[in-house]
Image (tube, grey):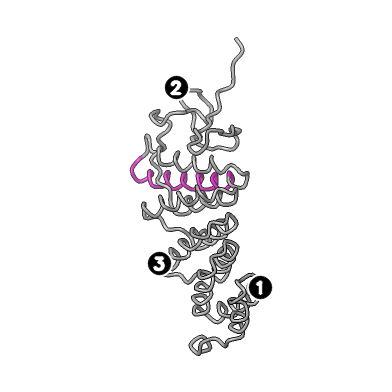
Amino acid sequence: LVSQPPPTYVPMDLTSSSAVACDSSDYRWWGRNCPSENPGASQCVATVDHVCGDITHGKQPEDVAKAVAAERHKYMRLIVNLGKKGRWSQAVTALEEMRRHRIEPNSKAGNAAMIACIQNGRWDVALKLLEDFEMQGLSVEEDTFYELISACGFAQEWQRCLELLDRVQQIGIVPQASAYCSAVKVCLRCKQYPTVLRLLEEMEKQSLRHHNIAQQLRLEMAKDLPEQWQRWEQCRAHERPQAALLR
């Protein structure tokens, strides 16, 4: 009899009906030898119920935390690499795999999955992950918020941009000028003129740098505003910043 190579374990794609198969080299799930299923294979288990799916099996209590931390780090690297390869759906699936194997994702793994989705044009999935992480008490990095704001801007989702700006401020962070610029520009493209002016006024109060960039935006966008607002905004673009910003 000719021996057949062990089957490759490909996780189920939870986000798309058109899953892309991946090479076993892309995954590092459970690297021990399995005594009863595919001995010697690095991917020996396709079900969580099997003993090889539990990295804590047979370990002393003091070694369990180390084992979980090490495996969590490997998952994070896996998610980052999948994102770079454009496999956003498998990056999301890796998060589900972590939970099924009783390894709770940390903020780094969650942010890596969100970035994988954003970089591959799936801002909608990233927003869903954001909601899940906030419910679980996981923190989202500031840069991830900005990446998501920019992605929603390119998708003409101006309301999403505003919601994300509000979330950044709710956690006590002053949004960067680049985030305001993304929101202003998408609102301008979507002809949300009152919102554009409100954002500029809010932006000018944040810092001297915010103020200067807002003034530059006023000059650039004046030609795209309704005619009755153009000259007024051109004049406002030369106003001096508030005294508090000059201190």
Q: Nearer the viewer, residue 238 or 171?
A: 238
Q: Residue furthest top?
A: 1
> Which numbered disc covers residue 170?
3
Give the structural element (helix, strand or loop) at label 1. Answer: helix
Please name the residue shown 55% across and 48% down the image: 122
Cα distance between the residues tagged 2 and 1 = 72 Å
Please name the residue shown 48% across and 37% down the image: 14
Residue that badge 1 annotates: 223
Give the structural element (helix, strand or loop) at label 3. Answer: helix
Q: Is residue 65 magenta?
A: yes
**Part of the protein shown in magenta:** 60-82
Q: Is residue 127 magenta?
A: no
Cα distance between the residues tagged 3 and 1 = 33 Å
Q: The disc labelled 2 sits on which kind of residue? A: Ser
Q: On the image, which quarter does residue 57 sit in?
A: top left
Q: On the image, which quarter does residue 4 sit in?
A: top right
Which of the two discs, 2 and 3, labels the residue nearer the N terminus?
Answer: 2
Given contact means CB atoms under 8 Å apart, are the residues at marks 2 and 1 in contact? no
Please name the residue shown 53% across and 79% down the image: 204
Q: Residue furthest left?
A: 61
Cα distance between the residues tagged 2 and 3 = 52 Å
Q: Position of residue 47 (x, y in %)?
A: 43, 29
Residue that badge 2 annotates: 36
Is residue 168 positioned above or below 69 on the image?
Answer: below
Q: Nearer the viewer, residue 193 or 144?
A: 193
